[in-house]
Amino acid sequence: MKTIRFGLIGGGLMGREFASAAARWLHLVEVSARPEIVALCDRETSVYAWYRDNLPSLRQVTDDYRALLANPEVDAVYVAVPHHLHQEIYCAAIEAGKHLMGEKPFGIDLAANEAISAAIRRHPEVFVRCSSESPFFPCMQKLCELLEQNAFGQIIEANTGFLHSSDLDPGKPINWKRIARFNGQYGVLGDLGMHALHVPFRAGWRPRNVRAILSNIIKERDDGRGGRVPCDTWDNGILLIEATAGADGNTFPWTVKLQRMAPGHRNTWFTEVLGTRASTRWSSANPQMLEVLRYTPGARQAWEQIQIGYESAFKTVTGAIFEFGFGDAILQMWAAFVHELAEGKPRGKFTGCVTPAEAAASHRLFTAALESQAQASTVRLQA
Ligand SMILES: NC(=O)c1ccc[n+]([C@@H]2O[C@H](COP(=O)([O-])OP(=O)(O)OC[C@H]3O[C@@H](n4cnc5c(N)ncnc54)[C@H](O)[C@@H]3O)[C@@H](O)[C@H]2O)c1
């Protein structure tokens, strides 16, 4: 099996998720390549011990990402750092000729994203993708099959989103994700938005205009040292988009709901598509159940509730009768990245990671959403 030697820049929450997925590669069957993490970079030296203890393959540990990028042993990098560093480190990785899995939002703002896109254009030999694991839940993969089969007919309405309640506690101290300087003006849109856009963009849905309502619910938080500091990022966002799904010019309303303060939700991804021939809905609150309604004129309308087990895009040792979770989706996403890097193409239309073009489309939408919020009006997007 081919080995791709990875450097990891940013060894926090998502860095550990990648290390865990790479360590569990034997879970996958029928893969032609595997990742091996040979280098780690983090500014925070306290994270090193966990990686040293758990990754026997680790040969370089540094606090300088330039040293890691200069390491000829490293073929590809995963960069999982705060948003204000995306442009600098992604561009440096691409210029160094390293294949790149970057994290969302793939640049703190539109200008940063454009700089990253320009670096990619200068280096077509480098494979670049953005992380988003939500499509890899088996129910989402089935929903994607329906999209691929054009089973919905004309789309009447769509609703996608990502809800959690990690910020409901007003006593939770501030961190970089709640400070616009590090997280970006997009706030919750940049944090959660990609997960609700990846499948729709891959399906070919294009936003024509957007009306956004964004909320900053908690404006100040504890700084963790007994003081109070501004919490200046958007907590929640609702986007009402007029979208097209194909060349026929039909438009439909598409809502994208992104909330850090959604009472009752822990980590809820959802997708609902209502069409003239079929409709479907799925929520990770009930991860194994996909609902489908097939409409035949004159016939009784009934939602079918289908139990979908561990029927993953990339086969694993786990049988289809068992259940699937967040860590499994991360492993599947990494299988998709490594497969596409090794084979030169994704296994299927909906089994590829977010492309730079899709990330750029998300930036155009979020930038228009900020403008809509500022003007309290609908903002058009370029075709
Ligand atoms: N795909 C997902 O589900 C998901 C979930 C959470 C976060 N994310 C994204 O992942 C990225 C990182 O988020 P996180 O939750 O892992 O953050 P984190 O704060 O847990 O980890 C970030 C790490 O980067 C390190 N770092 C900071 N500056 C650095 C520098 N100059 N050089 C090297 N390392 C540096 C920090 O010390 C920290 O260990 C963000 O883009 C975020 O939006 C994605």
Image (spheres, helix red, strand yellow):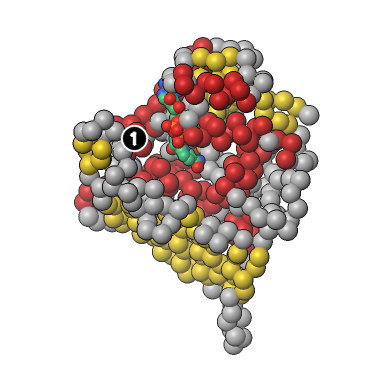
Task: Choose between 105 and 220: the one closer to the eye.
Answer: 220
Residue at x 22% of width, y 55% of height: 376
Write down which quadrant ligand 1 falls in. top left
| Residue at x 53% of width, y 43% of height | 132
Q: Quadrant of the N terminus?
A: top right
Q: Which of the two residues, 341 or 8, is positioned nearer the viewer here?
A: 8
Above or below for 60 versus 117: above
Q: Is residue 77 left or right of residue 373?
A: right
The answer to whether one can see residue 369 in this image is no
Q: Is residue 369 above or below residue 13?
A: below
Q: Position of residue 136 (x, y in %)?
A: 61, 49
> In the rendered image, is residue 326 in sight?
yes
Label 1 CB-ligand 1 distance < 8 A: yes
Where is residue 354? Give x, y as percent.
Answer: 54, 41
Q: Nearer the viewer, residue 335 or 12?
A: 12
Q: Residue at x 33, y 51 (%)?
A: 168
Residue 317 lies, with reference to residue 6, above or below; the image says below
Which amino acid lies under the numbered mark 1 shown in the image of this protein?
A: Asn
Secondary structure beneath label 1:
loop
Q: Residue at x 64, y 24 (%)?
A: 55
Q: Which residue is mark 1?
A: 175
Residue with the most extreme bottom position: 298
- Characterize the local packing of mark 1: few (<14), some (14-19) or many (20 or more) Cα atoms within 10 angstroms: some
The number of numbered discs placed on residues in the rendered structure image is: 1
Q: Quadrant of residue 314?
A: top right
Residue 119 placement (x, y as % from top left): 47, 25
328 shown above or below 97? below
For the view shown, which residue lies furthest in the front direction? 226
